[in-house]
């Protein structure tokens, strides 16, 4: 939600800032803007509603001069105030000396706004961010830290409630940016060799220039200059930061010949899964990435909650089947946004697994905090090194899916399923429900799945053709049983968000309890079918469900294991998958549903990387 970048160094800032914004546009595309500090102690500012290309067109007119080697940029996902030019960041104080960009929500902005208006200042936008520019100017001009930009920013931050990453530049303070964060992401990019520094929401913004990064803890303030960075706490604690090396490069953040990032990310799924699984069995058992939990603490777990949102929630639903089966522990999967408001029963023997691609999702982060306050242990499954959710967890397993730029989750989802299966095996071993050789055997089976996903990808041409054929449908239903049920939910979510089409996923057994009334002549219904060999009972029940909907006029799209001859007579379209063990089926069955949604959206003329109204990471509740 909102991407921010700042640069100080010897080069012209504008092209670097624009390039960083291009790489972060997935975080929001309601407006974009830049502010560049000139050598004449002025700020050049350009802002434009809509996608980054609109801002670039404005800059190309040459109406605003933007020379200078210190600059900031912002791409917005609107919260306070509509997606208009006047609400686009950066926001300035009344003298145009200070420019501020912001990601997050300032919860006490209404009283602060009144205070500014009472002081006779007219605000020019509807945003919560603009109040920061005015408060900062007041502090800098006549507050206790007058003339000290970092000190003034710290004083302002102490007055703010909510979530924020802020970056500010002052026309009269050359070669310096000050940034602060609470509950929203901010990383520093260090390119000491070139005497240049970056701050950004995401390492993707500066990965083309440096892979040396610094993550910042809560309530931290950082000053960057061409000479380096200095971190302090604006709320009085010790400086809290960690340097790290980014283990992927700029190629990973490019489209690499694909039309969309999402196409590339679908194709990258075998690697994403393989990289996530690799090296997590060391001969004595499953190894997590960051383990701040003792063996004993895993052994005494008596209940598991999985908390997450959207596709990550569906990954949790898939995992429930495996974890319960392997560990005999009760597993509840909960939407993070509901979890902490219903007073769940938690104690020190509860393990809460938080799944988040971004590591920033506000609801999931708050669920983690709630769980820890109740003394539960928290294990994070996360794709983003340096993000907040792993920082606040007792153990971490990273999904090494690489950067996911397409807003809809694809490779991150598959990697999450793989990672949480590893957690299930680690728990089974700790609790003694699996012997070491069984854990090793299951790990080997899991490690064969990247090849099965690769094979699935070679079978997608009929799915693309099908997508084009049904692109005009009004709605599509998705059915599944057992692990096929969360796969059906994920398929429906992909279609909703990419193709803006009504789509619902149901447990096939629920059909007769209501949803069957939706079936009408010609309605496409996707059915994720279990294996006739490994799940014969479920298979025959699903076959009955297919016959019931076909009898009522639905067009059936049957996703089934290769060689399953029994379903063919009831399938208007048959999509085949490689044969894999029952619990592994989601890893292959999700792929055609991703491809189908992407193809329908493409046929309907939509940008599949940037679905309307969405942003990649949801840092507000
Ligand atoms: C859907 C999608 C979202 C995310 C959800 C959670 O395709 O991408 O539903 O899965 O917003 O995000 P993370 O995993 O970053 O917490």
Image: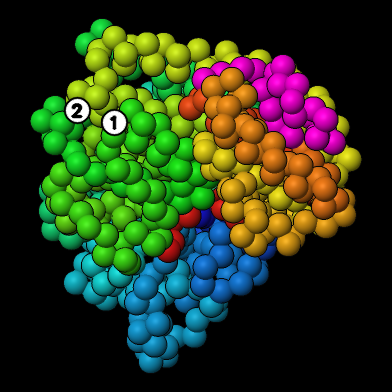
Task: Indicate which disc, 1 or 2, sits on the residue closer to the N terminus.
Answer: 1
- Where residue 102 appears, as percent x and y from the top left, is 44, 60
Q: Quadrant of residue 321?
A: top left
609 in relation to 33, above or below: above
- Where residue 92 appears, as percent x and y from the top left, is 48, 69
Cα distance in 3D space between marks 1 and 2: 7 Å
Q: Residue at x 18, y 32 (%)?
A: 298
Closest to the observer, 492 or 482: 482
Q: Which mark is residue 97?
A: none
The stretch of residues the image draws in magenta is 558-581
491 in relation to 64, above or below: above
Tag 1 near tag 2, CB within 8 Å: yes
Q: Quadrant of residue 216?
A: top left
Q: Residue at x 71, y 21 (%)?
A: 564
Q: Residue at x 31, y 16 (%)?
A: 439
Closest to the observer, 184 or 390: 390
Q: With 374 as the anchor, is 311 left or right in this view?
A: right
Quick one: quadrant of the C terminus?
A: bottom left
State the residue position of label 1.
327
254 in relation to 357, above or below: above
Q: How many marks?
A: 2
- Where residue 220 appears, as percent x and y from the top left, is 25, 52
Q: With 31 as the anchor, is 138 left or right in this view?
A: left
- Where residue 461 appears, as percent x and y from the top left, is 81, 24
State the residue position of label 2.
431
Tag 1 secondary structure: helix
Say if residue 24 shows up in the picture.
no
Say if residue 291 shows up in the picture.
yes
């Amino acid at each position: 939600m909102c991407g921010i970048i700042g640069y100080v160094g010897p080069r012209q800032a504008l092209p670097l800032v624009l390039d960083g914004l291009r790489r972060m546009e997935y975080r929001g595309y309601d407006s974009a803007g830049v502010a560049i500090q000139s050598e004449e102690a002025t700020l050049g500012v350009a802002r434009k509603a809509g996608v980054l290309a609109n801002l670039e067109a404005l800059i190309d007119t040459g109406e605003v001069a933007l020379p200078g080697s210190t600059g900031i940029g912002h791409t917005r996902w609107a919260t306070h105030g509509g997606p208009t030019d006047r609400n686009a960041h950066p926001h300035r104080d009344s003298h145009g000396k200070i420019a501020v960009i912001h990601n997050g929500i300032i919860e006490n902005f209404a009283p602060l706004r009144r205070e500014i208006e009472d002081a006779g200042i007219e605000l020019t936008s509807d945003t919560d961010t603009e109040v920061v520019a005015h408060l900062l100017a007041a502090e800098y001009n006549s507050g206790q830290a007058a003339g000290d930009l970092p000190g003034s920013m710290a004083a302002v931050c102490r007055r703010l409630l909510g979530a924020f990453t802020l970056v500010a530049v002052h026309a009269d303070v050359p070669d310096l940016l000050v940034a602060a964060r609470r509950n929203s992401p901010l990383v520093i990019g260090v390119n000491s060799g070139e005497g240049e520094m970056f701050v950004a929401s995401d390492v993707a913004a500066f990965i083309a220039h440096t892979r040396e990064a610094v993550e910042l803890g809560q309530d931290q303030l950082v000053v960057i200059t061409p000479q380096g960075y200095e971190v302090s706490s604006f709320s009085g604690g010790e400086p809290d930061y960690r340097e790290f090396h980014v283990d992927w490069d700029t190629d990973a953040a490019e489209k690499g010949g694909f039309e969309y990032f999402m196409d590339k990310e679908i194709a990258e799924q075998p690697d994403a899964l393989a990289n996530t699984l690799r090296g997590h069995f060391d001969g004595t058992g499953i190894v997590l990435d960051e383990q701040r939990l003792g063996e004993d603490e895993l052994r005494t777990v008596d209940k598991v909650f999985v908390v997450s949102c959207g596709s990550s929630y569906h990954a949790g639903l898939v995992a429930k089947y495996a974890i319960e089966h392997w560990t005999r522990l009760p597993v509840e999967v909960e939407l993070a946004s509901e979890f902490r408001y219903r007073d769940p029963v938690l104690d020190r023997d509860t393990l809460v697994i938080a799944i988040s691609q971004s590591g920033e999702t506000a609801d999931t982060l708050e669920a983690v905090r709630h769980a820890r306050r109740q003394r539960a242990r928290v294990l994070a499954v996360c794709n983003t090194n340096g993000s907040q959710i792993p920082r606040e967890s007792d153990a971490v397993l990273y999904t090494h899916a690489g950067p996911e730029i397409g807003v809809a989750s694809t490779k991150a989802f598959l990697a999450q399923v793989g990672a949480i299966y590893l957690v299930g095996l680690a728990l089974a071993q700790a609790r003694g429900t699996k012997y070491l050789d069984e854990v090793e055997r299951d790990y080997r089976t899991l490690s064969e799945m990247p090849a099965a996903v690769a094979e699935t990808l070679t079978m997608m041409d009929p799915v693309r053709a099908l997508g084009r054929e049904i692109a005009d449908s009004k709605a599509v239903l998705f059915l599944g049983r057992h692990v096929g049920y969360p796969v059906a939910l994920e398929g429906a979510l992909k279609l909703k968000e990419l193709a803006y089409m009504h789509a619902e996923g149901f447990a096939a057994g629920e059909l007769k309890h209501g949803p069957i009334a939706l079936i009408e002549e010609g309605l496409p219904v996707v059915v994720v079918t279990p294996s006739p060999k490994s799940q014969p009972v479920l298979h025959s029940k699903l076959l009955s469900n297919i016959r019931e909907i076909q009898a009522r006029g639905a067009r059936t799209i049957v996703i089934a294991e290769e060689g399953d001859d029994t379903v063919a007579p009831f399938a208007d379209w048959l999509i085949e998958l490689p044969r894999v063990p029952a619990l592994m089926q989601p890893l292959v069955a999700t792929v055609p549903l991703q491809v189908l949604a992407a193809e329908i959206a493409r046929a309907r003329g939509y940008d599949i990387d940037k679905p309307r109204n969405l942003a990649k990471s949801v840092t507000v509740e």
